[in-house]
């Protein structure tokens, strides 16, 4: 027969063991494991019930009560232990995730588009506002599209104006985006209104010329297109790019694929026309070549020049960027020197 006293001793031993062993618990998981080892069906507390059968019947009720008290004490004890542990873990997390909002921030450098891309985008913006759509041709062309169809047959002296990189007797790197005019007129019927940006290549190399540069070609073909339409469109373009005070002037020039041909000057946006270094004291700056599409070119593309007429212009993108941003050597646009490029954040 088991002695109730002795069993009471066992009960307080269990209690003591729980209190002592729980001192070194590290986290909630450990609390949970320990709780299981005491309170599960076959846990240490449940096992005390095994003594029931050895006890004097008059004492069974008391013993049962004592074990139940121990059980509910243990439940409360582990609950509060878990609460404490939860708080401790949370505090640790707060501590490790603490942000010092008084700390100075790291300097973030933001990038920007290359000046040539900025001007390209601005030009596309201006002309697409006037209804132009984009045609992108290829950089490798054949002789026909780059020259012959543009009224510049072999041995034509105008071929000397553009020193050409030939890839073979037939193929070359296009010297002008004007080659796109032919592709477009061959494949579309008037009315035509296209803008053709792209790289062009010439064997030419000094402070204002580079063997590779970019142009923006414009072509409009419809009934009754005149130089007045050309000047009107270019006026809108120069005012948007160089400022609303800027005026244009057309000077006679020569291109085999336009007749008449013009060179377009803008009033100097640096001195307002009074004369300065930028305009070489003339008050005017040359910005592009343009003209009325030569009848021969329309004929070459199967368009009747007695019904339709066209205008064309070719803008040098690097030249526009150099003028607008005050860059005096074209190489600065190709050297990727961030000290130069990061100063030009137009859009
Ligand atoms: N293609 C000419 C050049 O590169 C520019 C131009 C284009 C002239 C369209 C007239 C018409 O010099």
Image: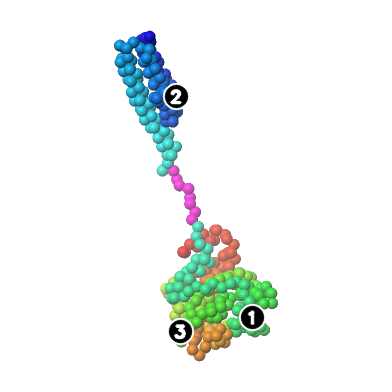
Q: Residue at x 55, y 71 (%)?
A: 198
Residue in the foreground of this view, choosing between 307 and 326: 307
Callout 2: SS: helix
Which SS does the magenta portion mostly show? loop
Callout 3: SS: helix
Residue 133 visible in the displayed image: yes
Q: Circle 2 sits on which residue?
A: 24
Residue 294 visible in the displayed image: no
Residue 177 in the image, given as x and y percentages of width and height: 56, 75
Cα separation between marks 3 and 2: 93 Å
162 in magenta: no
Label 2 CB less than 8 angstroms from ligand 1: no
Cα separation between marks 2 and 1: 92 Å
Label 1 CB less than 8 angstroms from ligand 1: no
Q: Residue at x 42, y 23 (%)?
A: 42
Residue in the foreground of this view, choosing between 2 and 16: 2
Check the image and report above or below for 127 versus 308.
Answer: above
When asked about the image quadrant of residue 63, the answer is top left
Check the image and report above or below for 345 versus 280.
Answer: above
Q: Earlier in the sequence, mark 2 or mark 1?
A: 2
> What stretch of residues is rendered in magenta?
103-110
Count neighbours of disc 1 (C-alpha within 10 A) and say few if under 14, some if 14 to 19, many if 20 or more: some
Foreground mark, 3 or 2? 2
Q: Circle 1 sits on which residue?
A: 159
Residue in the foreground of this view, choosing between 327 and 347: 347
When asked about the image quadrant of residue 318, the answer is bottom right
Residue 203 in the image, given as x and y percentages of width and height: 65, 72
Residue in the foreground of this view, choosing between 51 and 264: 51
Q: Which mark is residue 228?
A: 3
């Amino acid at each position: 027969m088991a002695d109730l006293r002795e069993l009471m001793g066992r009960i307080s031993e269990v209690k003591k063991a729980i209190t002592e062993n729980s001192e070194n618990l590290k986290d909630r998981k450990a609390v949970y494991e320990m709780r299981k080892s005491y309170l599960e069906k076959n846990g240490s507390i449940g096992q005390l019930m095994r003594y029931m059968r050895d006890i004097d019947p008059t004492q069974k009720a008391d013993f049962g009560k004592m074990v139940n008290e121990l059980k509910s004490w243990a439940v409360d004890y582990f609950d509060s232990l878990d609460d404490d542990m939860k708080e401790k873990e949370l505090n640790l997390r707060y501590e490790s995730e603490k942000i010092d909002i008084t700390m100075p921030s790291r300097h973030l450098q933001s990038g920007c588009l290359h000046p040539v891309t900025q001007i390209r985008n601005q030009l596309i913006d201006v002309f697409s506002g006037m209804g132009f759509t984009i045609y992108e041709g290829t950089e490798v062309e054949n002789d026909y599209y780059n020259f012959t169809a543009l009224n510049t047959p072999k041995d034509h002296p105008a071929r000397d104006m553009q020193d050409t990189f030939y890839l073979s007797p037939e193929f070359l790197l296009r010297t002008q985006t004007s080659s796109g005019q032919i592709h477009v007129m061959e494949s579309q019927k008037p009315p035509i209104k296209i803008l053709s940006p792209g790289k062009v290549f010439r064997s030419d190399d000094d402070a204002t010329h580079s063997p590779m540069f970019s142009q923006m070609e414009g072509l409009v073909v419809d009934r009754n297109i005149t130089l007045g339409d050309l000047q009107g469109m270019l006026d809108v373009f120069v005012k948007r790019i160089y400022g609303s005070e800027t005026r244009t002037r057309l000077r006679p020039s020569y291109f085999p694929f336009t007749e008449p041909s013009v060179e377009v000057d803008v009033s100097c946006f640096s001195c307002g026309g009074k004369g300065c270094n930028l305009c070489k004291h003339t008050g005017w700056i040359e910005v592009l070549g343009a003209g009325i599409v030569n009848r021969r070119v329309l004929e070459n593309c199967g368009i009747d020049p007695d019904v339709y007429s066209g205008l064309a212009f070719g803008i040098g993108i690097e030249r526009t960027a150099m003028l607008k941003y005050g860059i005096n050597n074209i190489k600065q646009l190709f050297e990727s020197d961030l000290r130069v490029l990061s100063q030009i954040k137009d859009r």
